[in-house]
Image (cartoon, grey):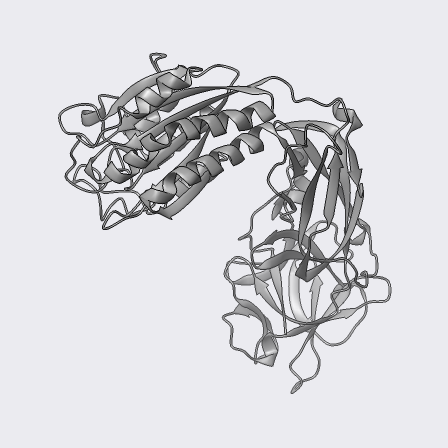
């Protein structure tokens, strides 16, 4: 039935203007007989069980039935069953700092009972605990006592008020390797486990994202603040920070339900050639109503674009529209034929800019001697360039220093220099959008008559060489945002 989904509209067009944002609404309608395929969710709760967690543990126990009921209800909406498991961790104090209170089971009463076994009786010297040991034990499930089901979608809900010691050394864990943040992250990803991190910050407790060095044991002494953020991001989960004990249960329910929807519901995802432009859809996921219209609404977010603009003059394929798709996913699986076509058109970029190199954030500069260099920002006209459109497509790069004869960026072979006015091929450049980040577009500056060559700054020298800032192989479209052949256009 996936092929019967409809989209309104089913085609979007936007202009790459390097400013603003365009987020058109797309309505997705499920066919009348659509049902999600039968799925499974394994959700494992693990918490810091030391003295400072008393209030949080009390709040969880008071509302344990509500937590499990609400998560199960959301899972049922995507035709999934749920197994719950429960564990706890603390720090090394003569025993291994992890206990599996309840193997993953469909029996919610057993999980409620296991949550009631969380305790604050375990002591620790420093704020940081052995969370990485606990997470590693849960992910690896070496003896099968955690009980991950082979075909289930896996979630860990991690609750704590302090970072993990990093590393956990071999002589304490009994393993033949140290457990670091990277080891834990790799293990979680290898087992397809998403982590929801619930960070409590009360009193002097620093929370899961706290500094593991300043708050750690002498046996550790490494790592960096932000552990939980990074682990949640890397595993496709989510993070709630700076919570009070009273806020914890609501966030567990909200984020747990959202994660189930994300992994089991409908979502829209840009294919790689659009994803490099940060094309996304919100909300992350949606579940169509069981009856009635069966419609859900998404906004397709096209950053630094406009609905209407003057298109650039065309020149070869690079200035033609880039047509890609935002695809429908059901339960995280591609449906291939169900997609919204997105056409991105290069807008006319005529205007005056600073040309900022992505590798060092320095600016293209017409030096006092009439040469070209890349130098720190001096807030001067000799670092400002006007993109002058050419009749047949492309631009001249004209320096904005009005105290001197107009100079233009020219090239022959790999050599680049500042030259007088000329509209021949040596002076003609294409400004190619390669990627988007939080600051705007990243462009390559490519000579009109030199296929896949680009202006770069490396080894203290400007030159035109083979463009390598984007990996196009296998349809990857992966962009190195710090590449010396990428440039920002900062409008003046």
Task: Quadrant for residue 294, please give it.
Answer: top right
Q: Is residue 146 visible?
A: no
* The residue positioned farthest toward the right in the image shown: 392
Residue 225 image offset from top left, x and y in percent: 33, 47
User: Based on the displayed image, in which of its 4 quarters is residue 126 positioned?
Assistant: top left
**Total labels drawn:** 0
Q: Is residue 311 left or right of residue 476?
A: right
* One can see residue 367 in this view: yes
Question: Is 174 on the left-hand or right-hand side of 303?
Answer: left
Identified at 66% across, 55% down, the residue is 454
Q: Is residue 350 above or below residue 343?
A: below
Residue 403 in the image: above or below residue 475:
below
22 or 463, nearer to the observer: 22
Q: Please tell me which residue lies in front, 335 or 404.
A: 335
Horizontal and vertical percent position of residue 1: 76, 22
Q: Position of residue 366 (x, y in %)?
A: 60, 75
Quarter the C terminus occupies: bottom right
Q: Is 331 displayed left or right of 47 in the figure? A: right
Task: Using residue 12 as the reference point, say whether residue 188 is left or right of it.
Answer: left
Which of the 4 image quadrants contains residue 309?
Answer: bottom right
Vertical arrangement, residue 96 with respect to residue 161, above or below = above
- Residue 34: give x, y in percent of width and height: 72, 23
Along the line of sight, the residue nearer the viewer: 26 or 423: 26
* Residue farthest toward the bottom in the current orientation of the protein: 403
**356 up-or-down from 248: above or below:** below
């Amino acid at each position: 039935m996936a092929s019967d989904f409809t989209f309104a509209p089913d085609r979007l067009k936007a202009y790459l203007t390097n400013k603003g944002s365009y987020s058109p609404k797309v309505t997705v309608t499920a066919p009348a007989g659509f049902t999600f395929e039968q799925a499974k969710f394994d959700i494992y709760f693990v918490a810091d069980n030391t003295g400072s967690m008393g209030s949080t543990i009390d709040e969880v126990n008071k509302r344990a039935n509500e937590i499990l009921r609400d998560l199960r209800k959301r899972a049922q909406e995507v035709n999934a069953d749920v197994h719950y498991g429960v564990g706890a961790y603390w720090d090394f104090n003569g025993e291994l700092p992890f206990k599996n209170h309840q193997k993953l089971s469909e029996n919610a009463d057993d999980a409620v009972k296991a949550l009631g076994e969380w305790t604050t009786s375990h002591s620790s010297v420093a704020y940081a605990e052995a969370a990485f040991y606990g997470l590693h034990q849960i992910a690896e499930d070496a003896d099968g006592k955690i009980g991950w089901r082979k075909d289930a979608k896996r979630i860990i809900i991690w609750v704590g008020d302090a970072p993990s010691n990093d590393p956990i050394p071999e002589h304490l864990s009994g393993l033949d390797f140290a457990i670091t943040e990277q080891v834990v992250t790799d293990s979680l990803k290898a087992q397809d486990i998403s982590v929801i991190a619930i960070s409590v910050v009360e009193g002097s407790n620093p929370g899961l994202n706290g500094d593991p060095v300043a708050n750690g044991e002498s046996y550790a002494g490494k790592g960096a603040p932000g552990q939980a953020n990074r682990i949640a991001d890397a595993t496709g989960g989510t993070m709630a920070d700076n919570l009070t004990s009273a806020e914890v249960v609501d966030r567990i329910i909200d984020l747990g339900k959202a994660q189930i929807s994300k992994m089991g519901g409908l979502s829209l995802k840009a294919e790689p050639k659009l994803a490099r432009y940060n094309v996304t859809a919100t909300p992350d996921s949606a579940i169509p109503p069981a009856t009635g219209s069966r419609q859900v609404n998404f906004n397709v977010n096209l950053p630094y674009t406009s609905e209407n603009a003057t298109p650039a003059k065309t020149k070869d394929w690079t200035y033609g529209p880039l047509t890609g798709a935002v695809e429908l996913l059901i339960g995280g699986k591609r449906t291939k034929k169900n997609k919204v076509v997105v056409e991105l058109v290069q807008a006319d970029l005529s205007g005056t800019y600073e040309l900022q190199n992505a590798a060092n954030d320095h600016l293209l500069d017409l030096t006092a001697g009439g040469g070209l260099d890349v130098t720190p920002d001096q807030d001067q006209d000799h670092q400002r360039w006007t993109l002058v459109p050419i009749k047949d497509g492309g631009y001249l790069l004209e320096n904005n220093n009005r105290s001197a004869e107009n100079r233009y960026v020219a090239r022959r072979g790999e050599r680049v220099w500042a030259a007088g006015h000329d509209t021949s091929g040596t002076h003609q450049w294409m400004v190619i959008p390669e990627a988007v980040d939080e600051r705007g577009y990243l462009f390559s500056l490519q000579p009109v008559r030199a296929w896949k060559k680009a202006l770069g700054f490396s080894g203290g020298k400007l030159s035109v060489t083979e463009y390598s800032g984007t990996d196009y192989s296998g349809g990857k479209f992966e962009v190195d945002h710090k590449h010396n052949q990428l440039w920002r256009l900062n409008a003046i």
